[in-house]
Image (tube, grey):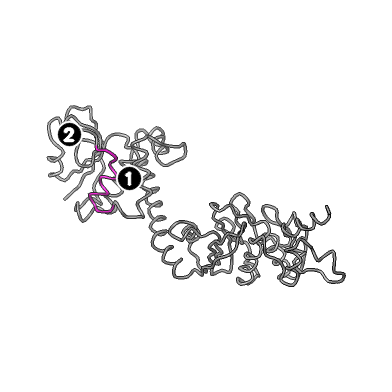
Amino acid sequence: MFDTIATHERPHFDEYAAIFLLKKFGENKFPGISKARIVCWNSGDGNGVGVKRSVDDYEKEGALFIGVGGGRFDEHPVASGERKQNECSATLVAKALGIADDPSLEKILKFALNNDIKAAASPFDLAYITKIMHQRYPDNSDKVMEWVMAGLEAKYQEQDSFFNEAKKEFYRMAKIEEIITPRGMLRRMATVVSDDEQINKLARSAYGGNTAIIIQKKSSGHVQIFTNQHYGLTLYDIAQILRLAEQKAKGKIITKDWKVLASEGKVAGAEEWFFFQAGQMLLNGSLTATGVPATKIPLEQIQEIVRIGINPNAFEPKFSSRCKRGICAVSLIKGERCPWYEFGLQRCRKIRFEMRKK
């Protein structure tokens, strides 16, 4: 039975990650480890591992050493050998437990290794904040341990949900189609009815086929439209059509100005939709805006709005032959207006601009 996990004073993120893995996944291989106490080893007290007793001696008595002592979970160089190349305590533990290839742990292990080998850290990442937490609470290692473990657990749960629940839900529920985007490129669009908070991330990743546009409808009726920024797609025309459609669905048009309809944030009359321009997202409510009413636009209509808005070569069917020749019928046919004129699409405005120049 293992009742102790020992590491050095002020453990780094790497050692904390190794301890997290042992406590969460190590019970079968190391009985008792999930409830083992954590002690910080003072390497300068003259009684340390490798001085009077070996790591193996301590392990036989139920103590595992992490990042110290030159044992199997210490990657540092010792007198009897060189540093374990491309390893850190966390990766060594993961391999010993047979979980090194678990995709849910991939980011945690990669981050721990990169931080340990290259000392790479940004001022707001978990490894750096772990360091300054020790500075803030030098005599309260339990407080730091609790904080770091909570962060690791949250990250693991996020990744586990991503690779299991979200992935399964996406492939079970998503309707995939190829749509025409700028420059005539065919891209994947996914429409999915799901409450999973990570499903849009999954769809945009390689695990979801690098989907370009995701339309997600929640069980509450709220709809969100996401883009994969890798493709550089924009939603300005979609925002204009969508906001007009929302106002029509409510029976009252307040905002018609095309520039306003394409603006960031909310617009009068279509407050249901928030346009986040930096991320090119159209959000009918969100985790931080739960009180927003659900859209009145049917999902099928939203899909068609996206198809029209994202394809610069799409024109109103009745007038498309003229449009494609650079002729806007609005100014030529008296008494008959193109129903798409009110959208103020960039492609249409460009045609009229060129006509005026001539």
Q: What SS does tag 1 mark?
A: helix
Residue 323: x, y in percent?
Answer: 75, 64
What's the mark number on residue 57?
none
Residue name at image x 27 percent, y 49 percent: 94
Q: What SS does tag 2 mark?
A: loop
Reply yes or no: does residue 112 show up in magenta. Answer: no
Give the position of the C terminus as an image quadrant. Answer: bottom right
347 vs 17: above or below:
below
334 vs 102: above or below:
below
Residue 180: x, y in percent?
Answer: 60, 63
Amino acid type of disc 2? Val
Residue farthest to the right?
A: 334
List the residue tagged with mark 1.
Answer: 17
Amino acid type of disc 1? Ala
Residue name at image x 55 percent, y 53 percent: 231
Reply yes or no: does residue 90 show up in magenta. Answer: yes
In the picture, measured across the screen, residue 268 lies left or right of residue 43, that is: right
Residue name at image x 41 percent, y 42 percent: 126
List the residue tagged with mark 2.
Answer: 49
48 vs 321: above or below:
above
Q: Quadrant of residue 319?
A: bottom right
In the picture, measured across the screen, residue 257 lies left or right of residue 71, that is: right
Q: Quadrant of residue 287?
A: bottom right
In the picture, measured across the screen, residue 222 lies left or right of residue 128, that is: right
Callout 2: few (<14), some (14-19), or many (20+) C-alpha neighbours within 10 Å?
A: many
In the picture, measured across the screen, residue 28 lies left or right of residue 189, that is: left
Residue 251: x, y in percent?
Answer: 75, 71
Residue 124: x, y in percent?
Answer: 47, 39
Q: Earlier in the sequence, mark 2 or mark 1?
A: 1
Taking depth in this image into account, of 323 and 24 the one nearest to the observer is: 323
Q: Which residues are magenta?
A: 84-99
Residue name at image x 37 percent, y 34 percent: 119
